Image: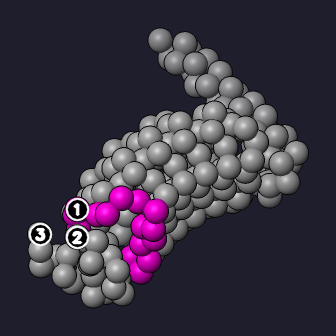
């Protein structure tokens, strides 16, 4: 009935506000910027930077994965994070910079391509053996660092990412696709040769 539906919506909204308030308290303790309190129990979208480096994390905290927060920069380097939850790539639609270096990631979710505003992705010093095809959907990506992993192939979709100006690959085994010699030249030249080889 309508009353039951209304009660459910109110309860859901209340739980959502409690979750956001809990995160904002934690964020203040971490030294992150927080959104402005509207005075009506809601918080405006304004939390832009998450700094959680060197905190011995084994998983991504899900309490900040709220689209309302408009997170633009996440730094979680030097932890022991094994995987990214699917919600990470769904909730963080405004994310522009992501530093997950110095973790133990073995794979990225195939939904990584949902992060449409991502410009900088640092994945160096993890345990990655490959990258998902969806990485090529990041049309605004400019910098990709995958140094010191176990990657030997880049997804062919990445060759169409025209904004990509830097791919750091040092410390991986020799690349099979694209051939290593294509990655040892300036990016524009490498992209042209790569696209012709596909």
Gap between marks 3 and 2 measured at Cα: 11 Å
Query: Which is more N-terminal, label 2 or label 3?
Result: 2
- Rendered view: 31 above or below 55: below
Instruction: Kindly indicate whether the residue at mark 1 contacts the one at mark 2 (C-beta within 8 angstroms).
Output: yes
Q: Secondary structure at mark 2?
A: loop
The image quadrant that residue 167 belongs to is bottom left
Which mark's residue is nearer the viewer, 3 or 1? 1
Residue 133 position, x and y percent, is: 27, 53
Few, some or many residues within 10 Å of mark 1 (<14, 14–19, 20+): few
**104 sits left or right of 35 in the view:** left
Of the pair 15 and 56, the residue shown nearer to us:
56
Q: Secondary structure at mark 1?
A: loop
Residue 157 position, x and y percent, is: 24, 63
Few, some or many residues within 10 Å of mark 3 (<14, 14–19, 20+): few
Q: Which residue is mark 2?
A: 179
Looking at the rendered structure, which numbered label has been put on residue 176? Answer: 1
Gap between marks 2 and 1 measured at Cα: 5 Å
Q: Residue at x 21, y 83 (%)?
A: 192
Of the pair 135 and 190, the residue shown nearer to us:
190
Q: Residue at x 88, y 45 (%)?
A: 29
- Rendered view: 26 above or below 47: above
Residues in magenta, as a range: 163-178
Looking at the rendered structure, which numbered label has been put on residue 198? Answer: 3
């Amino acid at each position: 009935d309508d009353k039951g539906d209304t009660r459910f919506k109110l309860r859901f909204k209340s739980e959502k506000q409690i979750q956001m308030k809990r995160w904002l308290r934690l964020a203040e303790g971490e030294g992150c910027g927080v959104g402005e309190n509207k005075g009506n129990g809601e918080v405006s979208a304004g939390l832009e930077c998450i700094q959680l480096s060197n905190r011995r994390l084994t998983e991504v905290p899900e309490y900040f994965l709220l689209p309302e927060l408009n997170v633009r920069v996440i730094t979680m380097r030097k932890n022991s994070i094994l995987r990214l939850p699917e919600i990470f790539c769904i909730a963080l639609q405004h994310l522009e910079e992501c530093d997950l270096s110095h973790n133990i990631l073995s794979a990225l979710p195939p939904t990584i391509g949902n992060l449409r505003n991502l410009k900088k992705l640092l994945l160096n010093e993890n345990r990655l053996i490959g990258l998902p095809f969806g990485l090529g959907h990041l049309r605004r990506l400019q910098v990709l660092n995958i140094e010191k992993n176990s990657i030997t192939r880049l997804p062919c979709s990445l060759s169409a990412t025209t904004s990509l100006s830097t791919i750091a690959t040092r410390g991986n085994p020799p690349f099979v696709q694209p051939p290593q010699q294509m990655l040892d030249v300036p990016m524009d030249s490498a992209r042209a040769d790569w696209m012709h080889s596909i």
